[in-house]
Amino acid sequence: MFEDNESSWEDLPDILLEDIFVLLEPRHRLEASQVCSRWYETFYAPRVWEHFTLKGNILTKRRFYVYKGYQRETCPRKTQICLHRVGYLFKKITITPIHDFQHVYEFIRILRAFLGYFEEFPMPLLRTFHFTFTCETRGITGVIVHGTGGKMMEELRHLLRNMKFLKDLKLNNLMLDDAEVAGLFDAITYNCSETIQTLEILNFTKVPYPILDITLFNNLHTLRTSPQHLDDEVVVILASSGVSNLHIIQGRYTCTTDSVSDDAWRLLKQIAPYFRVTLEVRGHTKTPLILQPHAPVNRIVYDCPNLKFPHETAVWVVHYYHTTLEYFAQKRLPRTHGPRTFHDRGDAAFLMLVRSCPKLHTLVISERISTATAILVARTKPCLEKFIVRQNGLLKRCDGPKTDNSFSNAELRRVARSYETTRDEISKILGRRWLPMSDRNFKKL
């Protein structure tokens, strides 16, 4: 009787089996498919192969070299079998940063040959292609930054020329020469000029280079690019195009560049009043946020552990974007020294942001702030939809300047003395249960 009621793996619903197969690498999926006929059918389920990600050792084999020993290299046979059997199910292909350039080159070459062999496009569901090049290597002399070129660039250009029906394209850290940009965009627009809706091109060139080729995409509505690829002319072109969302992203490999002039941004706001700009700092960079004077910025994101939000930057943010800013977030745990005194922390910057931006509805803070500052933020902006503060970054004190009458309030000093009363007070103000977030949950944001 007990055996009849006992559940087993073969009784799992199809959707759970598919979820398990999605978590496995292709090699382990193949091994699992040999268990039974039901798992074999799950192996070919469309949802299992929607997203194909090329990582370090996927589709490789071991080979012995006399001076190096056993090394991993691309296996053309495995790659061809994979593309023939399940390639028609791919909706998204992602090539992650891989230090083995030969592996990346061989995969691109085989994929390009596969797409160009058939008269009909063999991947009818493919809509997304993401490629991020590993432009940094470590040598004897230190870190070396280089770009894509030579045969790698040639194969990538042929691959993009053979792709069809793409809606989302990402090409990051290519670090091209100026002469190679036009040829790559010609390959992209050969079949996809009417279909691409989202385009991300970060660090496309080694030096500042305004990319005017975005006019070739007729249905583009979201553009993510680095600040060195923008100038006054590009901004005016964007205002006249169908693009409505511009994400200006700076990272570790962003070269030194100037901001777009305020006259160009004012002209953009006149031509396209619903145009929105997002400023984002990403990765392990220490370069301060590059502000765009009087741009229609509604989101500012710090996805960087090495940067804080200084008071000087807050002053300019309020000056430029006080009428448009809706979202401010620090997404990463800080890896810098966290000062404990009020004047060295970012309390004054966040209070200025909340008091001066009437449309602000989301505030995510990873830096250290006091319990008194958190209460004042809630009192100033009780309509905040999201207000997130780290539990380890919340200091139990009320140490604001004497010139600010808010900090000298006796009730505030009483409430800010403990974490329990602080949580209760903020929950009461916001009208919902509020708790500071643990570092483990903060990483999942």
Image: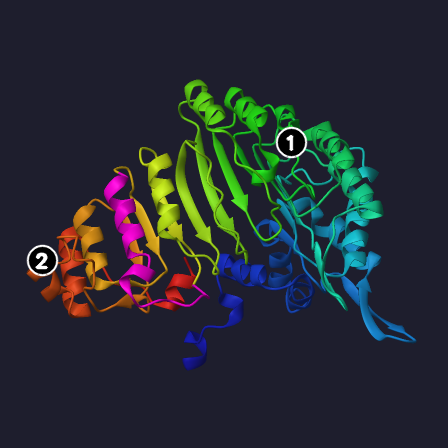
**Residue stretch in magenta:** 334-357
Q: Residues within 10 Å of mark 2 (few under 14, many from 20)?
A: few
- Image quarter where the N terminus lies is bottom left
Q: CA distance from mark 1 to mark 2?
A: 54 Å
Residue reaching furthest to the right: 66
N-terminal of the two: label 1 or label 2? Answer: 1
The one nearer the camera, 274 or 404, is 404
Q: Are marks 1 and 2 in contact (CB under 8 Å)?
A: no
Quarter of the figure with residue 223: top right
Q: Can the viewer see residue 328?
A: no
Residue 358 horizontal/vertical position (percent): 25, 37
Number of marks: 2
Helix, strand or loop at mark 1: loop
Three-letter code, disc 1? Ile
Is residue 42 within the magenta segment?
no
Residue at x 54%, y 68% (from the top left corner): 10
Q: Secondary structure at mark 2?
A: loop
Marking on residue 409: 2
Q: Which residue is mark 1?
A: 211
The residue at the point 32 percent across, 66 percent down is 393
Position of residue 62 in the picture relative to residue 53 (left or right): right
